[in-house]
Every structure is written in C-alpha cells, then in structure tokens.
C-alpha cells in the first residue's frame, strides 16, 4: 500500500510550485520574520516566568525590531502586569560601523548597508511607544556605553538583544549588561553564526568570553533565521 508520503513525494508540480515561490523570497525577509517571531516568544516566556527588568537592544538600525518588542509587550501584559513597567533602551551609532579592526571585516557589515539617522528612528519609535518609556542612545559603543548601566538608571535586564554584528560591539554591550543580568535574563544574539561559523570571531567570540568569565551559566533556548541564537541565564555564580 502506497504511503501518503510516497504519494506526495511524486507530486512534482507541487514541489516545483513551492520551490518557485520560496526561491523568490529574499532570505533577509525570512530572517526578519523569524526574528520577530523569536522576540515574541522571548517576551512571552519572560512574561509567564515573571521575569523583571528592562528591554535593552544593541544595534537598533531602523528600529523595526525595537518597535516590534514594544508591540509584543503591549499584547502580552495579560500574562504579567510587570510588563507594564518595562522600559525600552536602544543603543546604536546610527551611523554604521565606523572604523573596524581588520579581524572584524565582513563583506556584508558595511556602513553603506547599515547607516541610518537618529531622527528617523526616533519618529518611528515614538509613534509606536506612545506612553511607554523609551530611550534611544546614539554613539559608538566604546563611548556611549562607557558610563555603565547605572548611569542610565538601569538596574535589571529582562531581555538583552545584541544585533550589532561585530565582536567589539557585542563585547562592549555584554560588558555593559554584566551588572544587570540575573537568573532568567534572556540574551538574543542575532549574528551568532556569522564569520563562517567561527567561535573566535564576531558575536560568538564575545559571548563565549562573557561566559568564560565564570560569572554566569547560560542555556541555549533556540536558534532562528540565518544565524540567530537565544540563551537564558540559568544561574549567576558571583
């Protein structure tokens, strides 16, 4: 008796139709859709776990994922009233990458691909935020993050989204977050498998160094898109 799978596998026209549709969709579109779905899941998980703290995003670019997180919180307040007090902090140069070390060079990570303006992003974010607390901090991380989290009044992080692509920016972001991370903090790394999958370059290197300090234990939750990964801090050791 022919199985359903065997029957479907011979429907060549369906396979061709699916292939022709999918091949025309830019992989970047698929990645962004999965990123939005991932952020929604992370906000949901932090809500049902009653995780406290603010939302921090490093690498805001045009503000699309930042605005999406604001929408997620609004929709999920029914699961946790604590979400209503969430503050949103976005950090970006709003001018691309600036000068990169040779080890951080990547064919896609260029100022031409990632430059935007603070004014444009602010207008977009304000329309979505309405009465929620939103702070956008311009500047390259080595300067803008130097004062530390306490200088911004941040004492606890619920979700940290690192979408800044390079090793040095991710290192600076994670160093900034170190004092405000606690058990249950979610860390979303959008470019975890970049640089040909190397664990010695890019965001992966920065996160591995962060864990090797011995202060935190993290569990991998899931991956998404074209190289994103989500971790949750399961234990703070010191």
Image (spheres, helix red, strand yellow):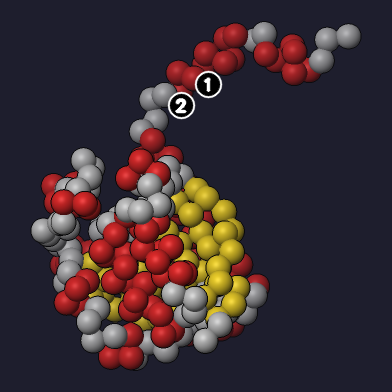
Tell me where residue 120 sits by quadrant: bottom left
Q: Residues within 10 Å of mark 2 (few under 14, many from 20)?
A: few
Tell me where residue 122 sits by quadrant: bottom left
Q: Which mark is residue 22?
A: 2
Q: Are marks 2 and 1 in contact (CB under 8 Å)?
A: yes
Q: Which mark is residue 182?
A: none
Residue 216 in view? yes
Left or right relative to 73: residue 110: left
Towards the viewer: 86 or 113 = 113
- Image height check: is 105 above or below 86? above
- Image height check: is 2 above or below 79? above
Residue linked to disc 1: 18
Q: What's the residue at 46%, 69% (across, down)?
A: 212
Towards the viewer: 161 or 207 = 207
- Image height check: is 229 above or below 145? above
Q: What's the residue at 22%, 82% (across, down)?
A: 146
Q: What's the residue at 44%, 74% (across, down)?
A: 213
């Amino acid at each position: 008796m022919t199985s359903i799978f065997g029957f479907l596998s011979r429907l060549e026209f369906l396979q061709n139709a699916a292939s022709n549709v999918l091949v025309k969709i830019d992989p970047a579109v698929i990645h962004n859709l999965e990123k939005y779905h991932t952020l929604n899941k992370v906000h949901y998980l932090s809500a049902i776990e009653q995780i406290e703290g603010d939302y921090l995003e490093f690498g805001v670019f045009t503000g699309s994922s930042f605005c999406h997180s604001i929408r997620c919180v609004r929709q999920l307040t029914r699961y946790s009233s604590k979400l209503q007090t969430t503050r949103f902090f976005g950090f970006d140069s709003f001018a691309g990458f600036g000068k990169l070390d040779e080890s951080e060079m990547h064919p896609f990570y260029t100022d031409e691909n990632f430059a935007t303006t603070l004014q444009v992003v602010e207008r977009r974010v304000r329309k979505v935020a309405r009465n929620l607390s939103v702070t956008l901090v311009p500047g390259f991380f080595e300067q803008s993050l130097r004062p530390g989290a306490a200088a911004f009044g941040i004492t606890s992080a619920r979700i940290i989204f690192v979408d800044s692509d390079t090793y040095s920016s991710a290192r600076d972001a994670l160093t900034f977050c170190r004092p405000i991370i606690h058990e249950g903090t979610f860390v979303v790394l959008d470019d975890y498998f970049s640089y040909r999958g190397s664990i010695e370059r890019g965001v992966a290197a920065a996160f591995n160094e962060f864990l090797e300090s011995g202060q935190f234990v993290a569990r991998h939750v899931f991956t998404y898109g074209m190289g994103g990964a989500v971790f949750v801090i399961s234990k703070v050791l010191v």
